[in-house]
Amino acid sequence: MGEVFFIGLLFVIAISAIWVVSSPNLVHSAVSLLFTLFGVAGLYVFLYADFLAATQVIIYVGGILVLIIFGVMLTNRIDKPVIESNSSNKIIGVFVSGFIFLMLSIIVFQTNWGEISNNSEGSSSVSLIGKLILCDYLLTFELISILLLAALTGAAMLARKKINE
Amino acid sequence: MNNLQVYLLISSFLFSVGVYAVISRQNAVAILMGIELILNSANINFIAFNRFTSNLEKLDGHVFAIFVTVLAAAEAAVALAIIINLFKNRGSVNVDEARELRG
């Protein structure tokens, strides 16, 4: 049962990712990005990363995807009936990305990754992550908070209407 | 089926699909979606390696994945602000047409 669900998840991710990059309609791209992100959250569940799965759904699906849909709506003229997004360099793109995928798959299957067989089911990861963030990675955590604040302030400043012009 | 190679394979697939979007799309918002795919593939890698090559009490990969998610949020906000400015100035978000330094 879990096996079938896992394979279905992989297919959902792959097909919706391809539709994200190949759909001529940007709104369709955004909606299938939703399925890709949900699929990745499901992969996190299979990897015993419960906190990350929740974070993925909240931040990516609830935040970034809404931001992207805002971007799609704000950067197209309303009087145009079709939100179009052309593609160029298709052949070069397929060639380059297919080459990268081929190389990466060869590397994936030929390297000895030194796997440890731990089949035990982990407990909830939230308390361990909290301890790590507030002990080992405290400085990084504070730095990334300041970075996020600066980036959001800068974004608000860039996108606002100029008042005195 | 549920082993490290499968996760690395799906993440490299997401990565190359994202690279395809960055190469071939002309709309700036679509390129941004490709970048989100690339960041997601990096996150899958972090968590898969954390799950399969260390013991379960060490969760450093999860912390890194959280940082990557925060960076993705910051990047999306700034990129959309720039894209909206581009649209205000030029009336289109086609990246092939945006080639002047002068606004």
Image (tube, coloured by chain):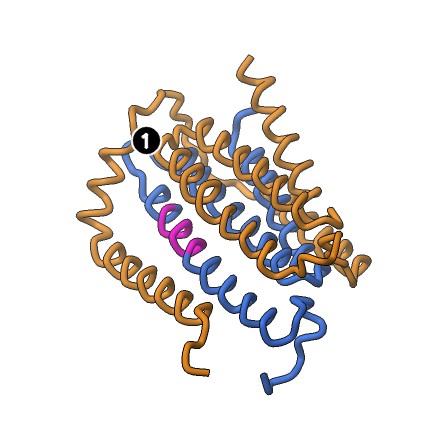
Chain colours: A orange, B blue
Give the quarter of the figure containing the N terminus of chain B: top right
State the residue at coordinates (63%, 48%): A104
Q: Residue furthest top?
A: A1
For residue A139, side relative to residue B77 (left or right): left
State the residue at coordinates (67%, 80%): B99
Of residues B70 and A81, the one nearer the viewer is A81
Is disc 1 placed on a helix, strand or loop? loop
Q: Quadrant of residue A146?
A: bottom left
Of residues A77 and A23, the one nearer the viewer is A77
Q: Residue furthest right?
A: A91
Give the quarter of the figure containing the C terminus of chain B: bottom right
State the residue at coordinates (27%, 57%): A140
Residue type at mark 1 is Leu
- The residue beneath circle 1 is B56
For residue A121, side relative to residue A45 (left or right): left
Q: Chain of mark 1?
A: B
Instruction: Please provide percent x and percent y for residue A138.
Output: 21, 53
Where is B66 relative to B71, above or below?
Answer: above
Instruction: Please provide percent x and percent y for residue A66.
Output: 50, 47
In this picture, which residue range is highlighted in magenta? Answer: B66-73
Magenta stretch, overall SS: helix
Q: Quadrant of residue B84?
A: bottom right
Where is B10 relative to A88, above or below?
Answer: above
Q: Residue furthest left?
A: A135
State the residue at coordinates (38%, 69%): A154
Where is A12 relative to A149, above or below?
Answer: above
Of residues B61 and A148, the one nearer the viewer is A148
Residue A25: say if magenta: no
Instruction: Please provide percent x and percent y for residue B50.
Output: 39, 39
Residue B70: say if magenta: yes
Instruction: Please provide percent x and percent y for residue B4.
Output: 51, 34
